[in-house]
Image (cartoon, rainbow, N blue to C red):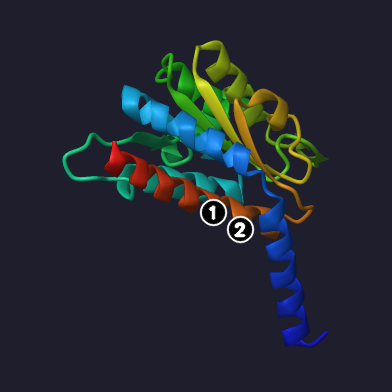
Amino acid sequence: MENREFIESYLSEVRKVAEAISVADIDRAIELLFEAWKNGSQVFTCGNGGSASTATHFACDLAKTTIVQGKKRFKAYCLNDNIPLVSALINDEGFDNLFYEQLKGRFEEGDVLICISVHGGAGRDKAGLWSQNLLKAMRYARDKGGKTIGFSGFDGGPMKEIADACIVVPIDSTPQVESFHLALEHLICSCLRQKIEES
């Protein structure tokens, strides 16, 4: 296959996926986050693998790119970012408890947890079922009176059933899903900044 043919095919796929993503689900996620901002609630992000980097980026953008002079700021934190703590918790409590254990000391009623996963907790590999640590954290957040937002792909997986809002990138391609998750967090933060300016 020639480079140009591959590029055109890839970009054509991008356009189709963009048109298939639910605007209503994006809108719901924005409203949940705007409510958290208004109430001064905390927002936590987390993910595994490539989604961990998106979680870090999302928390950064919530904390920085939504800043409007004279307005309060988002309280946004990524549960992936403290590497000594992450490695200690995995070592002592197991990978499934990585995010749950961090939330136990910090998550309060009204806070928001954003979990990012390509498969949404579906599928498995040599280590077992994927992203069970995210699903456990989401259930905990829900039980504590918080809200949960999921970013998933493929068919959404179990995350789609747990989250208060779940944005599914409906394509069976890890690179495409991860790329769209990053684009979506940029969209959401840009919209939130505008809403904060207008509030």
Q: Position of residue 185 (x, y in %)?
A: 50, 48
Q: Is residue 123 above or below residue 105?
A: below
Q: Is residue 90 above or below residue 172?
A: above
Tell how many labels. Answer: 2
Q: Which residue is mark 1?
A: 182
Residue shown at 81%/39% (left/top)? 123
Amino acid at dot 2:
Ser
Write down the quadrant of residue 195 in the picture. top left
Q: Is residue 13 above or below residue 8?
A: above
Residue 116 visible from this viewpoint = no
Residue shown at 50%/12% (left/top)? 145
Q: Position of residue 176 (x, y in %)?
A: 68, 59
Crowd around label 2: few <14 · some 14–19 · many ≥20 (10 Å): some
Residue closest to the eye, 187 or 96: 187
Residue shown at 54%/56% (left/top)? 183
Crowd around label 1: few <14 · some 14–19 · many ≥20 (10 Å): some
Query: What residue occupies the far front of the structure in this picture?
Result: 198
Residue closest to the eye, 122 or 5: 5
Q: Are marks 2 and 1 in contact (CB under 8 Å)?
A: yes
Q: Which mark is residue 179?
A: 2
Q: Which mark is residue 70?
A: none
Residue 49 visible from this viewpoint = yes
Quadrant that contains the C terminus: top left
Q: Position of residue 2 (x, y in %)?
A: 79, 88
Amino acid at dot 1:
Leu
Left or right placement of residue 172 versus residue 48 in this view: right
Q: Is residue 21 above or below residue 71?
A: below
Quadrant that contains the N terminus: bottom right
